[in-house]
Amino acid sequence: MRGRPLLAVLAASLVAATAAEAKLLPQMDKRVAAPGERVVVEFGAGTEYYLAGREVEVYLVGIGAAPTLTGRNDARLQPVGKLSRDRKTLSSTLAFRVPPLPTGRYTLVVYFRPTVTGRWYNLTEGLWSIPRLRDGLVIRIVRPGQ
């Protein structure tokens, strides 16, 4: 009997954690773009509160390379921006120009560093492979005029 309240608390915390992570899921406004085109990434309402006090770096990487990334210093990562501070909070929107990359499918990679641990984490690791989440994380880069 003593274990039931503990299980209820554990289950509630898992639901809350899932809801918080869903709010952090970035979404690109385009699914197809050419080099030089502007893309906006929305990190969701309330993101600035979840990420306040932390560093956030955003990259693109080819879909094939995503599962084998070795960290934020992996040479295959193409930096597209950092979330910036607007006074005391982080902006929840990032706009970038598509870099001159070869045509193909790329996924968004977001590294953040909590102030508590000081270690870098990949927020989007593996999410591009989940069909219901992939739409906002994957972009197809095409030649201009396609």
Image (tube, rainbow, N blue to C red):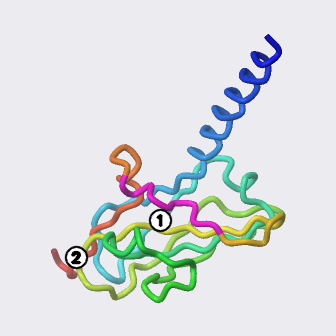
| Quadrant position of the N terminus in the picture | top right
The amino acid marked with disc number 1 is: Val
Percent position of residue 19, x then y: 61, 38
Q: Which mark is residue 127?
A: none
Percent position of residue 52, x then y: 78, 60
Q: At 34% from the left edge and 71% from the top edge, which residue is drawn?
A: 106
Q: Which residue is mark 2?
A: 142
Q: Is residue 125 magenta?
A: yes
Foreground pick, 9 / 26: 9
Q: At 57% from the left edge and 61% from the top edge, which residue is drawn?
A: 123
Magenta-tinted stretch: 121-129
Q: Residues within 10 Å of mark 1 (few under 14, many from 20)?
A: some
Please give left or right for residue 115 compared with residue 76 in the image. Answer: right
Q: At 78% from the left edge and 23% from the top edge, which residue is drawn?
A: 6
Per the model, the C-alpha gap separating discs 1 and 2 is 17 Å
Q: Which residue is mark 1?
A: 40
The answer to which quarter of the image holds residue 114 is bottom right
Q: Is residue 61 magenta?
A: no
